[in-house]
Image (tube, rainbow, N blue to C red):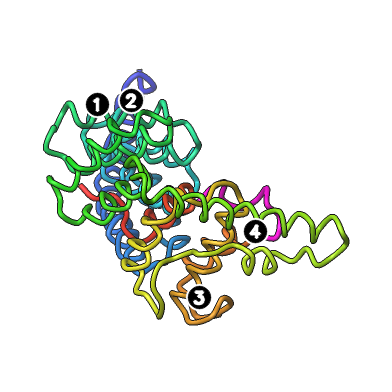
Amino acid sequence: MKTGFRIPKLSATAALLMLSFSALASPRSDEAVRESVLRLAAGDVPGAYEQARVAAAADQSSSKAFQQLARAAGAALDFPAAEAAASRAMELSGPTPALLCLRSEAHAGRGDFEGALADAQKAAAINPGSAQAVLRRALAKEGLGRPAEEVLADYLRAAELDVSHAALRDAAILRLAPPRRSSGGMGVLLGILAVSGLVGWAWGRWSGGSSEPEDLVASVAPRLPGTGLLAPREALRALSSVAASYPGPEGAFALAADLRERLTGRREAPKLPVGMEAFFERALNPDPQRRFRSGIELLGAFRSLVDPAVD
């Protein structure tokens, strides 16, 4: 008889303990989310990522924690983790434009532009006035090689909804709008410069010359427009205007080298924030297989670092 009475007592005690731990977990999770947001804003991507993981572990029923985990993972270029976190957040709270945009960005980071487009379209269907959703749709369509008119329509609409996207719209017009007959010579000239730069790099490697990445940087021009130091958001706008013109790991490397120099005044500087250092470690890796695959992918990663998606 005593045993029969003890079982419900133990169950009640266990339930009370679980409720107590649950009550403690949420404040800890909220604190970790706030810390992650602050660290991400400061450019400390590894720290932001770690705090977001702490938040999600502390309260696995918190959509907010998993949403921040998706942001931080995307900024850390861990796109599979970002996709999984955004999906988990949607399981908990349902799909929202912000969560769908985060997952769209993660899909695009993995090169899955079909998935990126599907999520962007869902986000835009929920909120047609979401500039972020329309912009993600434009980026996904461009990645899929959709007709220029269709892609430009979304870039134009995104800029109408949010003027901060005007630079991306203008850059898209320059690279996607049909060239005028009088400007054809300039297009040919830029093509010759790009091809000659790559041929020179290949010749140097074949003939036993220096194969250092810096040789490639010197051979590809022009890169970021203008001169002088740039703030991160200014650098993002400048990078947006030329990223599509630099395909392949070699083009991404050339852009990254110029980007670093415009941010710091030198190509190799020790005083960048931790998150920026991690970005450039990948962008300037001597192994082409470990670099970003194109200027567009470089742009996406830099945008996640400088201007992550918000609610």
Q: Can you say which quadrant of the picture contains the N terminus?
A: top left
Q: Amino acid at mark 1?
A: Lys
| Depth order, front residue of 129/95 | 129
Mark 3 vs mark 1: give the one in front. 3
Q: Residue at x 26, y 27 (%)?
A: 121
Q: Amino acid at mark 3?
A: Glu
Query: Does residue 19 appear in the picture of this structure?
Result: no
Above-or-below relation of 50 to 228: above
Q: CA distance from mark 4 to mark 3?
A: 20 Å
Q: Are marks 3 and 1 in contact (CB under 8 Å)?
A: no
Residue 250 within the segment the image draws in magenta: no
Tag 1: Cα neighbours inside 10 Å, few (<14), some, or many (≥20)?
some
Q: Which residues are magenta?
A: 285-295
Q: Residue at x 35, y 29 (%)?
A: 147
Residue 303 x/y as whole percent = 37, 55
Which element is circle 2 on? helix
Residue 250 x/y as whole percent = 62, 54
Above-or-below relation of 24 to 87: below
Q: Amino acid at mark 2?
A: Ala
Q: Earlier in the sequence, mark 3 or mark 1?
A: 1
| Depth order, front residue of 278/255 | 255
Q: Which mark is residue 197?
A: 4
Pointer 3: what residue? 261
Q: Amino acid at mark 4?
A: Gly
Q: CA distance from mark 1 to mark 2?
A: 6 Å
Pointer 1: what residue? 122
Tag 2: Cα neighbours inside 10 Å, few (<14), some, or many (≥20)?
some
Residue 289 within the segment the image draws in magenta: yes
Pointer 2: what residue? 118
Above-or-below relation of 150 to 156: above
Q: Are marks 1 and 2 in contact (CB under 8 Å)?
A: yes
